Amino acid sequence: MTACPGGTSPEVEARRIGMEQELARLTEMASLKDPCSRIQANLQALSIDEKRLALASLHITAVWHPDKSLEMHGSIPRDDEHSTPGCAASLARH
């Protein structure tokens, strides 16, 4: 078994890197919790037209048929260049 710099084995180093990556992923997820909570609260105060605009700005479509489950499709853009100016961003600011 060959040691890595600092005297750790490759297996230990690989586990350390994996744990650091997982910690970074969990930290990013935790940072989204507060904005998501604000958006959820603000969505309840919107009119139907405002909710439609918010979904359109996030490129989300919803289809409902009386005899089927609700279908939602789309993806949330990660930058402001692809969304309707101010719409989705303003939901998180209030």
Image (tube, rainbow, N blue to C red):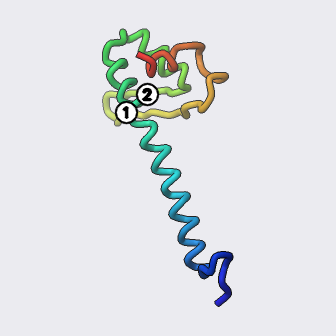
Q: In the rendered view, would you say 8 is above or below 65? A: below
Mark 1 surroundings: few (<14), some (14-19) or many (≥20) residues within 10 A: few
The residue that appears at 54% across and 68% down in the rendered structure is: 16
Image quadrant where residue 82 sits: top right
The image shows residue 56, relative to residue 14, as above or below, that is: above
Give the Cα distance between marks 2 and 1. Answer: 6 Å
Where's the C terminus, which quadrant?
top left
Kind of residue sitting beneath label 1: Leu
Q: Secondary structure at mark 1?
A: loop
Residue at 36 percent of width and 18 percent of height? 42
Q: How many marks?
A: 2
Q: Earlier in the sequence, mark 2 or mark 1?
A: 2
Residue at the outermost bottom position: 1
The quadrant holding residue 62 is top left
Q: Name the spot of residue 80 as percent of width and height, x first.
A: 62, 23
Residue 75 locus on image (x, y percent): 55, 34
Q: Secondary structure at mark 2?
A: strand
- Residues under numbered marks 2 and 1 in contact, where contact means CB atoms less than 8 Å apart: yes
- The N terminus sits in image quarter: bottom right
In the figure, residue 41 lies in which quadrant?
top left
Please give the name of the residue rendered at 55% of the width and 26% of the height, measured from the top-left corner. Answer: 59
- The amino acid marked with disc number 2 is Val
Q: Residue 70 — which label?
A: 1
- Residue 55 against residue 27 in the figure, above or below: above
Q: Nearer the viewer, residue 70 or 57?
A: 57
Query: To which residue does mark 2 refer?
Result: 63
Task: List x then y, in percent, for residue 12.
Answer: 55, 77
Percent from the top left, x then y, of residue 15? 54, 71
Q: Residues within 10 Å of mark 2 (few under 14, many from 20)?
A: few
The residue at the point 60 percent across, 32 percent down is 78
